[in-house]
């Protein structure tokens, strides 16, 4: 449809130039008024049709761009949702947020510009050039020779601009991730008195982005200037050539005038494409970035594991588990577990320095990260990974930062059991120590909270997470990823009693860096550089000066 409308537009541009030239020639030759009025009416009709076709083209492209970009956004969000923490860890939250919001807007703008401009450049100049050849072969040859020179300069400067734009978009991705990480860590930085020092780091990254943006704009402006200069020079050369021809009476006035009128129209699509090419580079880069994410292989939730109930006799065995984050060097394995066995209602503590692999191990066991290789048995059933529907139905995950959605407190507590009765929700809230807080609220359990738990404290957010776990009494595997890391010691102490009550009749896997939690564990796994340095009961590990004893000594020293 675009091609057909653009072809019609090319002919009305041609008629517009033809009838205008005809009217001017008749006026110059002092012919009757009728011979001037009729071409001017036809010129006006052609002018109106030109803009009508252009308007229809714009509407078609806008509709296509809107629908397609929303479809891409939907695919991207589905991909992120299905892939889970694995893709977030590799791509960065900031990058994914930027791609889903600003990136899609850039893609939509790219579609709006690129299709119209390409179609105009491909169809309108050839139609006009053929007509110019019929009027004056020499003029047609002149325009034919100039275009390759213009295109050559466009390619040279366009490649330079694209290289700069690629670099600038990569820096934009880094800035997005960096800014979001800084925003998330701001409370911790302020608490440690490091917020002002970190502001310099943010300034440095932002200034680098500004510098790269200006370099890109310099090349874009230079290429636009060069193209305008070349096309203007081409029209000027043609005008001089036609002027000399008219002075020497080598050809009539009409062919010369219609060629001169159509020459700017001949170059116009090329100039429009060049001017908007730089505006579409970010959209093109955003689209490529999104396609790379969409093309990433992901593992769907499997049903290889038969339904089972986790009890005191249940076991999980993990052998030769390896996982590497994409983008990390091939020699840098993020997780390398030789052997690990979980059984019954153990309380298993996972400890280690920051970056030792605690969170990676927790996420792999939760089925949020897919190992590159692993031998896993759950109740003697072999599975390729923990992303099994029946396994994930048995576990409750409590992360560092609890995710609460916009809705009532009751709806948030009923996350794992949406159809739970209000009485059951109240029992779970009471067990988590939430009842006193809810009694202070005017709307009680119907009190609305914002996305991400806005409106309530971090301690109350964690209590809602605990209430979820109490309500989901059919899930007997608890996975904690440093759930009290961002809480002060008083709030953490207040939460300890309901958490210990929750531990009963559950397999508990608890990643922590707080010493008092280690004392509550039956079994401890010490992580170091993605590997299990030691594992055993606290008493066994304390009996010799190994990785466990050194880590405990180090942690006590940090606290002092």
Image (cartoon, rainbow, N blue to C red):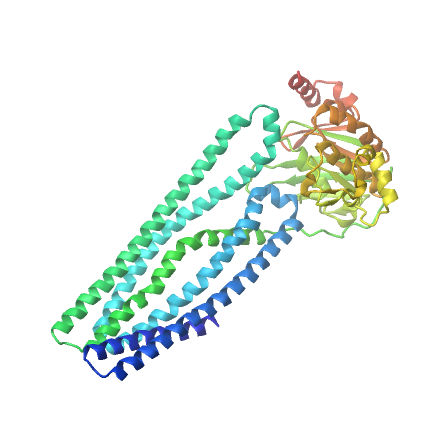
127 in relation to 447, above or below: below
Q: Quadrant of residue 267?
A: bottom left
Name the residue located 49 percent from the left edge and 31 percent from the top edge: 201
Q: Quadrant of the C terminus?
A: top right
Q: Position of residue 386 (x, y in %)?
A: 73, 45
- Where is 317 relative to 559, above or below? below
At which x and y percent is residue 472? 82, 42
- Asked if residue 445 is positioned above or below residue 489 in the image, the reply reads below
Instruction: Tell me if 193 is positioned left or right of 474 in this view.
Output: left
- The residue that appears at 80% across and 36% down in the rendered structure is 438
Q: Tell which residue pokes out farthest to the front in this image.
A: 33
Q: Nearer the viewer, residue 351 or 332?
A: 351
The quarter of the picture where residue 230 lies is bottom left
Where is residue 10 shown, x and y percent of the image? 37, 73
Looking at the image, can residue 253 be seen? yes
Which residue is found at the position 41% from the left and 41% from the top? 212
Q: Is residue 507 left or right of residue 117?
A: right
Question: Is residue 119 found left or right of 265 in the rendered image?
Answer: right
The foreground one among 322 and 273 is 273
Residue 483 showing in the rendered view: no
- Residue 49 position (above or below residue 76): below
């Amino acid at each position: 449809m675009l091609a057909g409308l653009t072809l019609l537009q090319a002919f009305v541009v041609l008629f517009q130039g033809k009838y205008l030239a005809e009217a001017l020639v008749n006026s110059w030759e002092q012919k009757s008024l009728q011979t001037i009025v009729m071409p001017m009416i036809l010129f006006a009709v052609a002018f109106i049709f030109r803009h009508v076709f252009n308007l229809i083209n714009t509407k078609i492209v806008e509709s296509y761009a809107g629908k397609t970009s929303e479809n891409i956004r939907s695919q991207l969000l589905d991909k992120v949702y299905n892939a889970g923490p694995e893709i977030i860890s590799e791509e960065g939250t900031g990058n994914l947020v930027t791609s889903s919001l600003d990136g899609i807007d850039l893609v939509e703008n790219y579609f709006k510009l690129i299709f119209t401009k390409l179609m105009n450049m491909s169809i309108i100049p050839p139609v006009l050039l053929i007509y110019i050849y019929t009027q004056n072969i020499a003029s047609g040859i002149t325009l034919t020779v100039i275009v390759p020179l213009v295109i050559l300069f466009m390619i040279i400067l366009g490649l330079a601009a694209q290289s700069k734009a690629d670099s600038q978009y990569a820096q934009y991705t880094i800035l997005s991730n960096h800014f979001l990480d800084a925003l998330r860590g701001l409370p911790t930085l302020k608490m440690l008195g490091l917020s002002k020092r970190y502001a310099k780091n943010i300034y440095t990254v932002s200034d680098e982005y500004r510098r790269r943006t200006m370099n890109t704009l310099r090349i874009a402006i230079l290429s636009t200037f060069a193209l305008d200069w070349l096309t203007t020079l081409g029209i000027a050369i043609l005008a001089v050539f036609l002027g000399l021809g008219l002075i020497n009476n080598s050809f009539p006035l009409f062919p010369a005038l219609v060629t001169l009128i159509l020459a700017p129209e001949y170059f116009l699509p090329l100039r429009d494409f060049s001017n908007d090419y730089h505006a579409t580079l970010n959209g093109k880069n955003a689209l490529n970035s999104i396609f790379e994410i969409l093309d990433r292989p992901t593992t769907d939730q499997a049903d290889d594991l038969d339904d089972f109930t986790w009890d005191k006799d249940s076991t999980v065995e993990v052998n030769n588990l390896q996982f590497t984050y994409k983008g990390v060097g091939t020699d840098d394995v993020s997780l390398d577990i030789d052997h690990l066995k979980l059984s019954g209602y153990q309380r298993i503590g996972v400890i280690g320095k920051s970056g030792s692999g605690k969170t990676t191990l927790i996420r792999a066991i939760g089925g949020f990260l897919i190992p590159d290789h692993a031998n896993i048995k759950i109740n003697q059933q072999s599975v390729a990974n923990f992303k099994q529907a029946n396994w994930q139905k048995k576990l409750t995950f409590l992360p560092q930062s609890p995710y609460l959605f916009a809705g009532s407190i009751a709806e948030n507590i009923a996350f794992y059991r949406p159809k739970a009765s209000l009485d059951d929700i109240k029992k779970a809230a009471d067990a988590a120590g939430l009842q006193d807080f809810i009694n202070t609220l005017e709307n009680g359990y119907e009190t609305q909270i914002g996305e991400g738990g806005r409106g309530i404290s971090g301690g109350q957010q964690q209590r809602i997470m605990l209430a979820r776990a109490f309500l989901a009494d059919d899930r007997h595997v608890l996975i904690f990823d440093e759930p009290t890391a961002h809480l002060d010691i008083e709030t953490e102490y207040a939460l300890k009693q309901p958490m210990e009550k929750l531990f009963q009749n559950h397999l508990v896997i608890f990643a922590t860096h707080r010493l008092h939690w280690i004392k509550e564990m039956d079994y401890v796994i010490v992580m170091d550089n993605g590997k299990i340095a030691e594992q055993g009961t606290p008493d066994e590990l304390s009996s010799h000066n190994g990785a466990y004893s050194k880590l405990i000594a180090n942690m006590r020293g940090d606290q002092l």
